Structures are given as structure tokens and as C-alpha cells.
Image: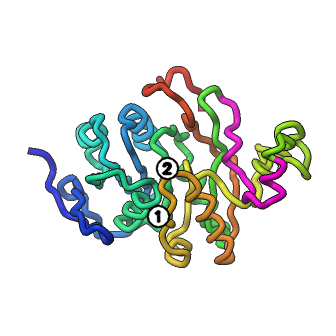
Amino acid sequence: DGPPTGIVQDRESHTPEIVWVQEGQRQDRAMTISVIVVSYNVRDFAKQCLTSLSRAYFDGRVETILVDNDSYDGTVEMVQQRFPLVQVIQNSENRGFAAAANQGIAASSGEMVLLLNPDTILEEQTLQVLVDYLREHPDVGCVGPKILNSDGSLQQACKRSFPRPWVAFTRLLGLARLFPKSRLFGQYNLTYLDPDQTHAVDAVSGSCMCITRRVIEEVGPMDEAFFLFGEDLDYCYRIHQAGYEVRYHPATQIVHYKGESVKTAPFDNLRV
């Protein structure tokens, strides 16, 4: 028969979006952290991501909300069958990352919000480390972990500068690649910084960024003019404008399958 449905109204187009909520799962009490996953035809990746979330150690209350942008690969059905505690918001069209993330945030109640790509795998302590860091540093509005590629190498985009003219110039000319350890030329991905130390940065990767509810309420929703890519830089910029810091915190790390063409990636080949 399937789980009961509710209706969330799309504010702009007024298109009804289906929300699947397992019986008894509507939360009356606030969560400690809300994990928002936006999916589009990534069933196998999403299964691994949600499995890693289900294995997470965390001493608070967690809710997971998957916002699906009209996938046709069975993502929604897989989540309903394998992860009945995950709330699913099923869109009738691909609304893009920012709009879908905003839907998830609006439906969430966590003190913290973790925006998480579906093609990621977390360590067991990732949630705990990120939440603890934000609680211990009230001046920090957003924190991101160390991010690895599937081969174990560092994903450089996990700590970045804003693309100011000089930063963009050095990248376009290849100077950032030729002199990655130079403070002058290595600003784009902050390659001159020790990746094993915590740093204040301009931006972290939107594939895994943890933000306090207080900051979200102050800064507002993501700019939905960004359909895909760039919304994380914009949001980090707005967090800075609101007077908060953004930190890269490698005390925990995740794997992100950025640019992978395969649809499955066995746990056995990974060491997080």
C-alpha cells in the first residue's frame, strides 16, 4: 500500500509535490541535526550514502530528508524500501540543487543542517565531529570536512577562496597548478594550507557543509537562480557577510565521487 502521503505546495509554480512520510515519522520535537540529500538519478550512490548515514555514531536526534528531483532510475522506490525512516520529498520536475535544498531545509527542524551530496560516504563520527565543532565555536556559521576522491586523494574544492580577479587570473593562467604551495598563486583551492589542519576559509564544498539553523534563519534560503554549481560559494559569501566564519575542519573526512561515471562504488574498495 505504501506510506501515507502529504502535500507540500511549491511556492512559485504551485505544483503539488509529493511527500512520503513513514507512519509516525512526523516530528513534534526539534532534531539536533537535519541531513538534507538532493538526488537526481543516483540510486546506487544514494544507497551507499544513506547506508553510511545509518551507521553514523551520534548522541543526538537525527532526521534525514531526501529531496528527489524527478528521478526515473528508481531512487525514490529504493529509499522507501530500504530506508523507511528517511523522509522523501518527491518533485515532479528537476528543480535544481538550490531549490531542492531549500525545500529540504524548510521541511527540517534540526538545530544544525547538513547539506550532503548523494554520491558521498561518511565516516561514523562525521555528524558528531561537525555538530560538536559548531557548538564549540559560535562565531562559525558553517563548517566542512576533509573530502577525498574515490582514490583517496584530496578533493581540492573542500577549501576554497572566492573567485576574486587575482584568484581567477592565477587559475586561468595555470599558475595555481604550477605553484600550489605558493601563498601568492595557490589561493583558488588554498593549496598552500596544510590539509590536515583546521583553517578559516572563504568557502567549503556544498557536497558536505554543516550550517547552524541560526545562520540559515539570518542569511535566508539558497539563491535558486543557481540551478547547479556556484550556490555553495554564494551561500558561504552570504554567511561571511552576516558576520560569521566558515571553517574547513579535517578532524573527519568523507569520500565524494565527484566526476565518477560509474553508478556503483563498492565499500570494499574504500578506506575512509
Depicted 42 relative to depicted 237: above or below: above
Observer-nearest of 235 and 142: 235
What secondary structure is marked by label 2? strand
Q: Which residues are drawn in magenta?
A: 152-170
- Percent of width and height locating residue 126: 56, 47
User: Looking at the rendering, in which quadrant would you find the C terminus?
Assistant: top right
Observer-nearest of 173 and 230: 173
Name the residue rendered at 29%, 55% in the picture: 89
Left of 139 or right of it: where is 209?
A: left
What secondary structure is marked by label 1? loop
Give the quadrant of residue 166.
bottom right
Residue type at numbered disc 1: Glu
Name the residue rendered at 54%, 21% in the picture: 269
- Percent of width and height locating residue 26: 25, 63
Mark 2 or mark 1, whichever is nearer to me: 1
Few, some or many residues within 10 Å of mark 2 (<14, 14–19, 20+): many
Left of 258 or right of it: where is 155?
A: right
Left of 107 or right of it: where is 120?
A: right
Earlier along the polypeptide chain: callout 2 or callout 1?
2
Residue type at numbered disc 2: Leu
Name the residue rendered at 45%, 42% in the picture: 118
Q: Name the residue under label 2.
A: 116
Q: Mark 1 points at which residue?
A: 224
User: Looking at the rendering, in which quadrant would you find the N terminus?
Assistant: top left
Few, some or many residues within 10 Å of mark 1 (<14, 14–19, 20+): some
Q: Distance between the residues labelled 2 and 1?
A: 17 Å
- Percent of width and height locating residue 36: 43, 55
- Percent of width and height locating residue 242: 64, 77
* Residue 251 is at least partly visible in this image: no
